[in-house]
Amino acid sequence: FNQGISPFIIILTFVASISGFMFGYDTGYISSALVSINKDLSNKILSYGEKEIITAATSLGALITSIFAGTAADIFGRKSCIMFSNILFLIGAILQITANRFWQMAAGRLVMGFGVGIGSLIAPLFISEIAPKMIRGRLTVINSLWLTGGQLIAYGCGAGLIHVKEGWRILVGLSLIPTVLQFSLFFFLPDTPRYYVMKGEYEKAKNVLRKSYRNASEEVIEQKVHELAALNKAIPGKNRAVRIW
């Protein structure tokens, strides 16, 4: 922070990186859950095929939404897309926690996969757009660290709940904590300066940049807005930021 970078950047990075944690946790807990489900779904032991469907459903959902996530982020904003992924995580987790049949469990995993596809793409984009150049690489990699950390915690929680009756429901339920936390925190945080410039909302972009660079002069803030506008202009396609003032 000796170059004028605000702790505000670290807060934004922390909140956005929760998506990486959820990605890791939600892909990590299923191995433990499948071991302890037993006859809790449809009152029968799951077949290998059914276990494969439950496991693969999240990856399928992530594949589907990742195709549209980038376009949606440009239309609705990076912040809004991440918050929407939280809603999908929430719905998916509730479907799994209350599941008594195989297909409901698979559907919950699929919906959760929709959230994974959006969050895993937009969170690194969000971080890269709010991070100053000199630490952009280091901040972006935090999302990957959270991802592997989420997997590690999922394995640990799974091991601790393996002998608890229907402990897999608790294991799934724990995923609600980071989901609700991220959604709540993003209510009080802005979108990225680049998105604001893309939409022609230059004052909002300046406000975020002022918080990000505490010691920067107004001239530097103006220069950064111009740089973002020029960057957006260089991208092919329709863009509202081709002219400034």
Image (spheres, rainbow, N blue to C red):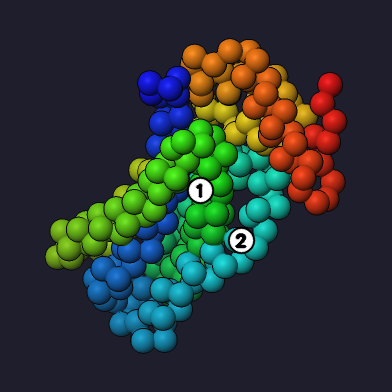
Q: Is residue 104 above or below residue 191?
A: below
Q: Amino acid at mark 1?
A: Pro
Among the 4 quarters of the image, the one containing residue 196: top right
Depth order, front residue of 160/237: 237
The secondary element bearing badge 1 is classed as helix
The furthest residue to the bottom? 48
Depth order, front residue of 57/231: 231
Q: Is residue 170 visible?
A: no
Q: Is residue 9 above or below residue 78?
A: above
Residue 55, given in percent of the width and then of the height, sits at: 41, 73
**How far separated are the C-alphas under marks 1 and 2?**
16 Å
Q: Residue at x 26, y 68 (%)?
A: 32
Which mark is nearer the camera, 1 or 2?
1
Q: Residue at x 25, y 74 (%)?
A: 35
- Please state, as top left, top right, bottom left or bottom right, where the C terminus lies in the image: top right
Q: Residue at x 44, y 37 (%)?
A: 135
The secondary element bearing badge 2 is classed as helix
